Image (spheres, grey):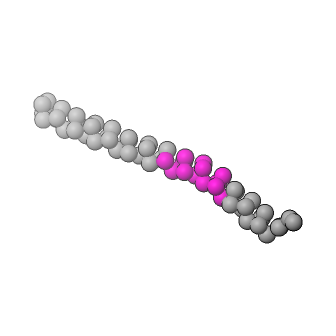
Amino acid sequence: MFDAHNSLTNFNMINVILALVPLGFATGSLVWLMTSGAQAQARSDAFAEQWMRDNA
């Protein structure tokens, strides 16, 4: 027999899972971008500080 409530619950769970996939991808991409940018900025700051000591 067809159970409309159970079918609707399964449908909603599939939608939630499908919505979480791009959300997780976007969040992971932003985390990677921010951490790699912070590392690059730290290297740049260290280089600039050393350059100022050498050329001041």
Q: Nearer the viewer, residue 34 or 7?
A: 7
Q: Nearer the viewer, residue 32 or 9?
A: 9
What secondary structure is the stretch in magenta mostly built from? helix
Q: Is residue 22 magenta?
A: yes
Q: Nearer the viewer, residue 7 or 53?
A: 7
In which quadrant of the rendered view does residue 40 lie?
top left
| Placement of the C terminus among the 4 image quadrants | top left
Farthest residue in the bottom direction? 5
Residue at 73%, 61% (x, y): give it. Answer: 10
Farthest residue in the top direction? 55
Please state the extent of the stretch shown in magenta in the rendering: 16-28
Q: Is residue 42 magenta?
A: no
In which quadrant of the rendered view does residue 11 lie?
bottom right
Q: Describe residue 41's horizontal placement relative to residue 20 as left or right.
A: left
Residue at 55%, 46% (x, y): give it. Answer: 25
Q: Describe residue 47's horizontal placement relative to residue 21 as left or right.
A: left
Residue 16 drawn above or below residue 21:
below
Residue at 27%, 37% (x, y): give it. Answer: 43
Q: Position of residue 15 (x, y in %)?
A: 70, 56
Residue at 41%, 46% (x, y): give it. Answer: 34
In which quadrant of the rendered view does residue 46 lie?
top left
Q: Position of residue 14 (x, y in %)?
A: 69, 56
Q: Position of residue 47 (x, y in %)?
A: 22, 34
Q: Describe residue 1's horizontal placement relative to residue 23 as left or right.
A: right
Residue 4 drawn above or below residue 20:
below
Q: Position of residue 32 (x, y in %)?
A: 43, 44
